[in-house]
Image: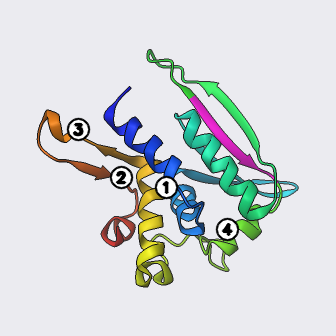
Amino acid sequence: MSFTIKVKEEIIAESTKDKAELSALIKMSGSVGLTNQGLTLSISTENAKIARHIYQLMESRYHIAPELRHHNKTNLKKNRVYTVFVADQANDILSDLQLADSFFGFETGIETSIMEDDEAGRSYLRGAFLATGTVRDPEKGRYQLEIFSVYQDHAEDL
């Protein structure tokens, strides 16, 4: 088990199931789909414990039971990818987390209220790390923490 996975599992065990954490997980690992029934939301990860954590966050915050899907990657590593899929209330969830604007565009930065609240900021960073973060074992070399974001303004906010 890698050092990053150990750290992520410790974070999950200490999580307060905060709204800001879920917001970061969706922004960094989520995707929105459109069906004839409306919007859908998918959050993907290769870690089963993170998938279970996302499921529990959605269940406790929005009182829904998302669908948990999985498939194997087609590359040589054959890692399993887990997807937490929400078909109902996706639009309400995105609105509550302030992830989409009124024109169905995504906000690419971090919400100002999160940036101004230290506790919410820490929670958001936990979610961002769970979604795309890596950390090097300090006993095996130089310190390094990395969190990947596809949006320039989001990366600057982080």
- Does residue 105 lie above or below 36 as drawn? below
Question: In the rendered image, which residue does mark 2 sit on?
Answer: 148
Q: Distance of mark 1 from mark 3, alpha carbons? A: 23 Å
Q: Main secondary structure of the magenta part?
A: strand
Above or below residue 102? Residue 46 is above
**Alpha-carbon neighbours of circle 4 within 10 Å: few (<14), some, or many (≥20)?**
many
Query: Is 39 covered by the magenta stretch?
Result: no
The dot on residue 28 is 1
Query: What is the residue that sits farthest to the left in this orientation?
Result: 142
Image location (x, y in percent) of residue 11 = 45, 50
Q: Residue at x 28, y 50 (%)?
A: 146
Residue picked out by circle 3: 137
Residue in view at x 71 percent, y 34 percent: 69
Is there any visible trace of residue 104 in the rendered image?
yes
Q: In the figure, residue 18 lies in which quadrant?
A: bottom right
Q: Give the side of residue 12 with respect to residue 2, left or right.
A: right
48 or 87, which is in the foreground? 48
Span highlighted in magenta in the image: 81-87
First in sequence: mark 2 or mark 1? 1
Asked whether the beta carbons under mark 2 and mark 1 sit within 8 Å of each other, the answer is yes
Looking at the rendered image, the disc whose residue lies closer to the viewer, 1 or 3, is 3
